[in-house]
Amino acid sequence: MDNDTRRVALVTGAAGGIGAAVATRLAADGLDVAVSDVTTRKDGLEDLADQLRASGVRGHVATADVTSEAEVEAMIASTVEALGRLDVMIANAGMCEAATLLDMTPEEWDRTMAVNGRGTFLTYRAAARQMIRQGDGGTIVGAASVAAFSASPGVGHYAASKFAVRALTETAAQEWAPHGITVNAYAPGLVHTAMWDRLDAQIGAVDGLAPGDVISQAVEEIPLGRTQRPEDVAGLVSFLASPDAAYMTGRSVVMDGGMLLG
């Protein structure tokens, strides 16, 4: 497939974990891929972009703090300048820290809501504006979570932010459907990434548990009996970003190994 017919995707939070797996999968699906993360993680982005190029597609790096309107708009502009257009936006950037509501500081609440809520809004909006300018539709995919369906103690701010992503996704899907833009989100369960290792340590410290105990106890409640891999999530995102999902919009799709069945 030549550059004129290949679709272009942009993935935020791509320096590791789910974002890197999604970028790799979309490249394997034949898309040119721009990858983004905060400036301090640029080296990881450059390595990933090199890997994408080695696989035969075009790769591009566009750093941004998703809480900054100016940086998000510059990220979109950089992608379009380098790769020609934007067809698929994967708003994957997010954060999670553990804190009970009684102990949580307003700053902790604000930071989580800024990255997960404001950051997703700014990314969705900038991508949609570019797709509307192009005039031929597009696909936007956000990062929800099982926490967007069922909140848990210790991560109330995270759950609230992911409920917000669900609501934003449903609203955007309705408002932008006349422009041919679909908007969906993926809602994974316990994905074993560096973020979950931090949560394991933070929650374990409060509950007096040894390292790894929080994750192992959670796995006991998962019918499939294992943590989720970033590649599992990437498979779902691959579908949501594909023409096979062209008639699907406004949905936050749970992929959790059965966690919510209990």
Image (cartoon, rainbow, N blue to C red):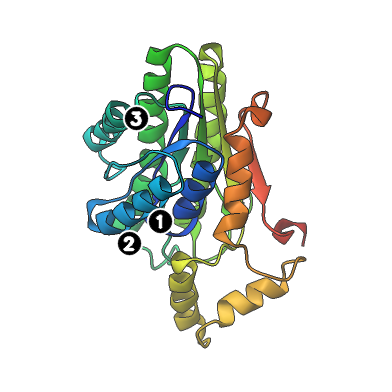
**SS assignment at label 1:** loop
The C terminus sits in image quarter: bottom right
Left or right of 172 on screen, residue 244:
right
Compute the Cα span from label 2 to label 1.
16 Å
- The structure residue drawn at horizontal position 49% and vertical position 61%, both measured from the top left corner, is 155
Secondary-structure class at tag 2: loop
Which residue is labeled 3 in the image?
83
Residue type at mark 2? Thr
**Quarter holding residue 36:** top left
Q: Position of residue 99 (x, y in %)?
A: 42, 67
State whether residue 126 is above or below residue 59. above
User: Closer to the N terminus: mark 2 or mark 1?
Assistant: 1
Q: Between residues 174 and 9, which one lies in front from this camera angle? A: 9
Kindly check if marks 2 and 3 are in contact, taking CB atoms under 8 A apart as contact.
no
Mark toward the start of the polypeptide (2 vs 3):
3
The image shows residue 204 at horizontal and vertical percentages of: 50, 80
Residue with the mark numbered 1? 95
Do tag 3 and tag 1 residues touch (Cβ < 8 Å)? no
Q: Is residue 143 shown to the viewer in this render?
A: no
Residue position marked by numbered label 2 in the rendering:
105
Q: Residue at x 41, y 59 (%)?
A: 16
- Disc 2 or disc 1, which is closer to the eye? 1
- Residue situated in front as seen by the camera: 145 or 167: 145
**What distance separates the C-alpha of mark 2 from that of mark 3?**
42 Å
Asked whether residue 237 is in view, the answer is: yes
CB atoms at circles 2 and 1 under 8 Å apart? no
Question: Which numbered mark, 2 or 3, is in the foreground of this view?
Answer: 3
